[in-house]
Image (spheres, helix red, strand yellow):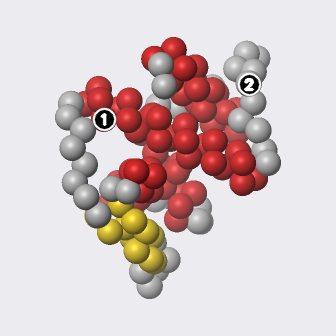
Amino acid sequence: MEDWELDFEWLQVRHFVKKAFNKHTLPDLNAILFLIGVQELGRWKTNFTKEEKQDLMHIAVCRLLSYDGYYQFAGRDADGWPHFEALKPYRKKGVKEQEVYLKTKVIQYFRDWEKETGLPLGNNTSNN
């Protein structure tokens, strides 16, 4: 994926999330990772603890890295929280490279969600 394509699709995801949650600002990568973690958990509560928020972001990263075989879903614990098994080491170096990689996986995640639900992310990022 070329840089401009990544930028365009990343912006499209951010606008979709902004609109879906009726926010005034575009979410950053951390906010979107948190939302993916909640989606993977499968339930929402008003107040997650700081530790739970960290766990949700970890779940999101594991889920995203599972696309390329770094992790595999191992099941849920007694409280229903998903767990992943590491299959191979993640060797991306540098914050920028890791961020670009995660953004491409977030885009893939939302494209898969779009196919599964039939609800479009939309191509129109204006009016937001």
127 sits to left or right of 51 = right
Residue picked out by circle 1: 98
23 sits to left or right of 68 = right
Labels 2 & 1 near each other (Cβ < 8 A): no
**Secondary element at image label 2:** loop
Q: Which mark is residue 123?
A: 2
Disc 1: CA contacts within 10 A as few (<14), some (14-19) or many (>=20): some
Q: Residue 88: image x %, image y %?
A: 25, 58
**Going 40% across and 51% down the picture, which residue do you hit?**
68
**Secondary element at image label 1:** helix
Q: CA distance from mark 2 to mark 1?
A: 26 Å
Q: Quadrant of residue 75?
A: bottom left
Q: Residue 65: image x %, image y %?
A: 39, 51
75 sits to left or right of 46 = left
The amino acid sitting under disc 2 is Asn
Q: Can residue 4 be seen?
A: yes
- Furthest toward the bottom, the residue is 78
The amino acid sitting under disc 1 is Gln
**Going 63% across and 36% down the picture, which residue do you hit?**
17
